Amino acid sequence: MRNPVASASGQKYLSTVKAQRLAPRFLCTVSANSEASGSTEDGVPSERGSFARAFNKYTGQESFAKLLRDSSLIRMGDPEKKLVEGVIYHIVEDDLYIDFGGKFQCVCLRPLNNGEVYTLGKKVRLLLHDMELSTRFLGAATDLTILEADATLLGLLGDRRSGSK
Amino acid sequence: MSIPAIKLKAKLKPEEQQVVFPERKPTENIVPVRELVAGDETLQNPDYFQVHELFTVKDLFDARVHLGHKIGSMDPHMKPFIFGTRFDTVIFDLDKTAFHLRQALNFAAHIAYRKGVILFVTRSAATMNLVERTALEVGEYAHTKDYDTKILTNSTTFFQGLTRLPDLIILLSTLDTVLAQHKIVADAAKMLIPTIGIVDSNCVPNQVTYPVPGNDDTPCAVELYCKLIKEAIMRGKNRRKLNDSQQSKAVETKE
């Protein structure tokens, strides 16, 4: 078992190994009782105290509702007209495939002006329009999706000309 | 107007019958299920291979498993698995996903323990390569190209010989194209082959034995599923290797 790690502030946190020993009874849910009781399937205790919340956060036992509430997806709100940071993970000639943390990637055309700087792994700024290009066409029973997000490439991250602070 | 009489075909006389069924006593070679279950140590614990410790809800969240498609393409059968929508984007309830994923991993581990043949299937171009590699690493099989119904429903003719069909089919995506479900889902149900399937918000979970509601499009989510499934299968296989070596040692010491 690892020794408790002391942080710079002097506060001690329990090692993850010890925390995991406490975890199993919350994570095993195969018995019928947990389903019947109507509690969350993970059995994670809903604690309101600040230490309990911090402990849950560091041991990776936060409830899904809490994770979602604090996530950047919720903080962002309406995806339209939002500035996001993405990473170029694939390039096909002039098409840049950029992952910005959503379900889908966006594909942007390499800018004509100073386009050589856009290489694999570069961080870029995007103006988001839609998280997924999916719409109902006339006569269709369900939406048709092209499995892509829609965003405008503004420039490299940290480039003053693209308007970043 | 008289109806013409229908002539019945003559039945075969007992001596003309070609197939002779042997007489069998009713209780021969049949062990009651409860005895089989009681004698097997792997069936005493609901989570014998401890698959619940392979992941946490936070791992699923970080891998973007909770992100679904838009509500316009949502199938009504997926409603029980959904937490809600955020600006038209469907969000999966990861507590439910975690439950279903544990069931699926537990099942996969048990099939692997019993030396079952496992087939990995997907038609997503982004993750095809990864799924094939995962299958290779666990020593099992993958089918990520065009699928023909005959390979399951008419296997003897297709492969020109007696064929052992997979004992489990793991679908990393249950869709063939965005509009059509992969035909292997229905065929597996016809051939009584259990399936584990990652079902996204635009998929139909009805014919999948162990549906796992979650994101099937983002590569990082599929990477997580492959990692967890690989770990569960390896636990089953390693346990089997251990038991076999223990048994062979016991036989040696007896001799």
Image (spheres, rainbow, N blue to C red):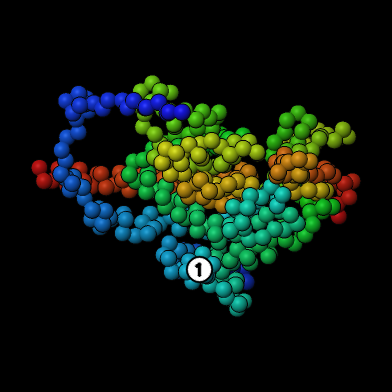
- Foreground of the two, B201 or B55: B201
Residue at 20% from the left image edge and 26% from the top image edge: B13
Q: Quick one: label 1, few (<14), some, or many (20+) residues within 10 Å?
A: some
Residue at 18% from the left image edge and 28% from the top image edge: B14
Where residue A157 sits: x, y (%)? Answer: 80, 47
Q: Which residue is mark 1?
A: A43
- Let me know if residue B86 appears in the view: yes
Q: Quadrant of the C terminus of chain B?
A: top left
User: Which amino acid, by three-letter code, is at mark 1?
Assistant: Gly
In the current view of this chain or complex, which residue is farthest to the bottom? Answer: A49
Read off the chain for label 1.
A
Residue at 59% from the left image edge and 36% from the top image edge: B176
In the current view of this chain or complex, which residue is farthest to the top? Answer: B160
Residue at 60% from the left image edge and 72% from the top image edge: A53
- Let me know if residue A21 appears in the view: no
Where residue A164 sits: x, y (%)? Answer: 86, 52
- Foreground of the two, A17 or B144: B144
Where residue B222 sits: x, y (%)? Answer: 57, 44
**Where B65 sits versus B23, above or below?**
below
Dot 1 lies on which element?
Answer: loop
